[in-house]
Amino acid sequence: MGFRGSVFSIATCAFMALCAVPALAKAPIGTIEGMVVNVSDGEHLTVSNNGTDVNVRLYGIHAPIISKVNKNKPWLSEPGQPFSGRAFMALANKVLHKQVKLEIMRIDRHGRTVAIVLADDHNVNHEMVAEGWAWACQKYNNQHDVLGYKHAEEEARSKKLGLWAQKSPLPPWEFRKMVTVGNKRISNAL
């Protein structure tokens, strides 16, 4: 085979492996369309579909955790992260009271629809990461679509966009580990 043949075979295998990357993309299990009637934070919203409200979590991203105020028991209120309000506003400005298409990726253990949200044919999930309002999800980092989110996150970091203007932004999964209410750690409660 010789040296040239070996190099050609290695290059061919590498090219074929790169071409196979899109096959890692997870296909949606379904799609629905509806009007966004509520935005809860930088990664959760409610879509009205033919009179039924669908609770949605944006697939592939993690936005900063927004504070939760308990009016009846203020000592049980939960602190939020820097830029959580801005992430909330960014998502609300993109989708609130707008018609969207949901590419449903799965239903989570809380019964929420985990979806890619498309508004005016724009991938809102990707935009939230690219503009610096969210982290790319670590859990699904081998899937092609999330790899695109990772690249968008790296670009936002390098440009210090959104939450990346902070010196060392703490990802939500680390923030949850640190949060306490009174003397009780609430890492699993969030």
Image (cartoon, helix red, strand yellow):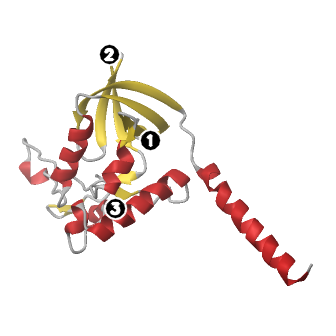
Q: Which residue is drawn at 28% across and 58% down?
A: 132
Q: Residue at x 22, y 60 (%)?
A: 162
| Amino acid on which the number 2 mark rests in the picture | Gly
Q: Mark 2 points at which residue?
A: 51
Could you classify mark 3 by the number of other residues whose Cα lies within 10 Å: few (under 14), some (14-19), or many (20 or more)?
Answer: some
| Camera-side residue of 100 and 155 | 155
Q: Name the residue under label 1.
A: 108
Residue 66 appears in view: no
Please, what secondary structure does the residue beneath circle 3 have? helix
Quarter of the view holding residue 180: bottom left
Whether label 2 touches label 3, CB < 8 Å: no
| Camera-side residue of 25 and 112 | 25
Closer to viewer: mark 2 or mark 3:
2
Which residue is at the far right? Answer: 1
Q: Residue at x 27, y 64 (%)?
A: 175
Question: Is 170 located above or below residue 30 in the figure?
Answer: below
User: In the picture, which quadrant includes the N terminus?
Assistant: bottom right
Which residue is at the far top? Answer: 50
Q: Distance between the residues labelled 2 and 1?
A: 22 Å
| Amino acid on which the number 3 mark rests in the picture | Trp
Please tell me which of labels 2 and 3 falls first in the chain: 2
Question: Is 129 located above or below residue 13 in the figure?
Answer: above
Q: Where is residue 69 in the image (x, y as percent from the top left)?
A: 11, 47
Q: Residue at x 14, y 61 (%)?
A: 182
Q: Distance between the residues labelled 2 and 3?
A: 34 Å
Please tell me which of labels 1 and 3 falls first in the chain: 1
Q: Which mark is residue 173?
A: 3
Please, what secondary structure does the residue beneath circle 2 have? loop
